[in-house]
Image: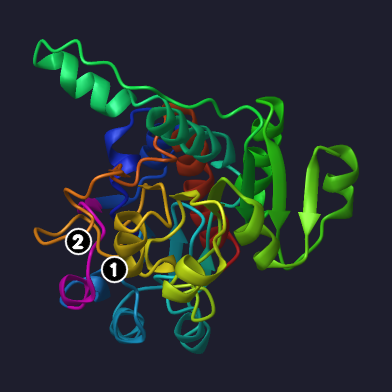
Amino acid sequence: MRILLTSTSFQDTPGKHQDLLNQQGYEIDTLRGPIPESELLPIIDKYDAVICGDDEYTEEVIKKGVEGNLKYISKYGVGLDRIDLQAAKKYNVPVTNCPGVNQVSVSEHVLALLFTFEKNVHVQYNSTQTGSWKRWIGHEIQGKTIGIIGLGAVGKELAKKSGALGMKVLGFDLHKDEAFLSKYDEVTFVDSLETIYENADVISLHLPHTPQTEKMINQDVIFNKLKHSPILINTSRGMLVDAQAVIKGIKEGKIRGYLTDVLAQEPMVEDEVFKGIDNVIITPHVGSRTYQSVERQGTMAVNNLISLVDNN
């Protein structure tokens, strides 16, 4: 079998996941993703299977693949929004992903961004590197209200950690997980996003990118619904926010800061609108990029592929 591996986290992190893949006897080619449709189309038919990151698996790519050898797609990671699942079903290409393995790493990254911003770590670091001893005044997070939009695995983990740090936790999700909420009574479930918009000092997004969630943080939300000039944190997908509305909101004091691990276009393009904006912190989609998380996700991605091959 000939395999295409494009996840850079998988490739850059040595561990059991790499050993497991190498033991399978596959012929493995590597590219550094995310790979756009235009680069996949000329090559995808050569491969029996892919272990992909956030590559662009459109219907055209999948169709071209099955006209050749493509039989399986194993997604390294959780989000499937870059894969046309209807097309995969249409052409009988099974797709797997890796849920429930990165919540510790991503939730820690949310808090790392929040602490960095509130304690001015990023600006103090840059300042002292020049020999300056200018000192900014920071903020405590204890006692603040965090609104978590999306109580999946990451959202739940963040809720637990935030409560342990003394924050008031509001959580919204389309599904109310009674078992989780009964175990963690410090988490207050709300059935309206407006409750979060009106009460939160920090808002953290944990949703997939769908037509319903695209630009859910928009001009109307920012200028008509936010009441506390919150810090907005996004470790999910860049398309969840209207970038120009967020920038305007920051400049006009409706948002204190935008802390993001994701952008609408990745890797970051030269004219990225968030680049250089005050009170914006960008990290390059590394929320789940810890040795522990990569090994868990990578191992699951390989085992998912092995299962697909063995069952077909």
Quadrant of the frame with the C terminus:
bottom right
Q: Are marks 2 and 1 in contact (CB under 8 Å)?
A: yes
Q: Residue at x 56, y 68 (%)?
A: 225
Badge number at residue 273? 2
- Residue 67 in picture, x, y percent from top left: 31, 86
Residue sitting at the far bottom: 90
Q: What is the basis of the colouring in this image?
A: rainbow
Q: Residues within 10 Å of mark 1 (few under 14, many from 20)?
A: few
**Range covered by the magenta-colored residues:** 29-41
Residue labelled with disc 1 = 244
- Residue 210 in picture, x, y percent from top left: 50, 75
Q: Secondary structure at mark 1?
A: helix
Image-quadrant location for residue 152: bottom right
Cα distance in 3D space between marks 2 and 1: 8 Å
| Residue type, label 1 | Gln
| Residue nearer the viewer, 302 or 225 | 225
Q: Residue at x 22, y 70 (%)?
A: 36
Quadrant of the frame with the N terminus:
bottom left
| Residue type, label 2 | Val
Q: Is residue 40 magenta?
A: yes
